[in-house]
Image (cartoon, rainbow, N blue to C red):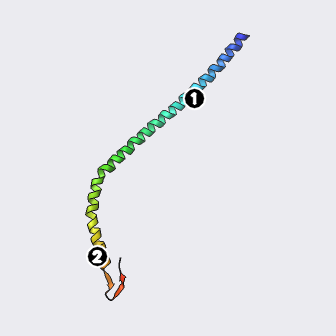
Amino acid sequence: MRDVQGCFLFLQDFSVDSQARREFAEKEDRLQKQIIQLSEENIELKFEVEQARKDIPRLKVLCADTHPQHTQTHTMRTRTVIHPCDTSQFVC
């Protein structure tokens, strides 16, 4: 009778051990998938940063080209008077 009980206890421990291993393996798989997903996202973000860095010189030139035109247009607008005698009607 003791041998049967011993085998039963051993089998219980084995099934608990087996289930714990299975749960551990499932958790490990989920973590590995998350690592892969985060690595892919990291690569995409690094690519976007590199593209933005490459775009900076072009945007600086664009701003430099646009800025004088904007300043000139703004200056012309602020100096325009609707009625020459009424100085309260400046367009800003």
What residue appears at the point 51 percent right and 34 percent down from the top-left corner?
A: 30
Residue 19 in picture, x, y percent from top left = 60, 25
Pointer 2 or 1: first along the chain: 1
Classify residue 37 by image quadrant.
top left
What residue appears at the point 48 percent right and 37 percent down from the top-left corner?
A: 34
Position of 34 with respect to 44 (left or right) is: right
| Quadrant in which the N terminus is drawn | top right
Residue 69 in picture, x, y percent from top left = 27, 68
Classify residue 21 by image quadrant.
top right
Q: Determine crowd level at label 1: few under 14, some 14-19, many 20+ residues with C-alpha closer than 10 A.
A: few
Q: Residue furthest front?
A: 87
Image: 9 above or below 92: above
Q: Residue furthest right?
A: 1
Classify residue 87 by image quadrant.
bottom left
The residue beneath circle 1 is: 23
Residue 11 in picture, x, y percent from top left = 65, 18
Image: 71 above or below 34: below
- Which amino acid type corresponds to the residue marked 2 in the rendered image? Met
Image: 21 above or below 60: above
- Which amino acid type corresponds to the residue marked 1 in the rendered image? Glu
What residue appears at the point 29 percent right and 61 percent down from the top-left corner?
A: 63
Position of 54 with respect to 7 (left or right) is: left
Task: Identify the secondary structure beneath mark 2.
Answer: helix
Spatial CA distance of label 2 from label 1 is 74 Å
Q: Which mark is residue 76?
A: 2
Q: Nearer the viewer, mark 2 or mark 1?
A: 2
Residue 84 in picture, x, y percent from top left = 31, 87
Q: Determine crowd level at label 2: few under 14, some 14-19, many 20+ residues with C-alpha closer than 10 A.
A: few
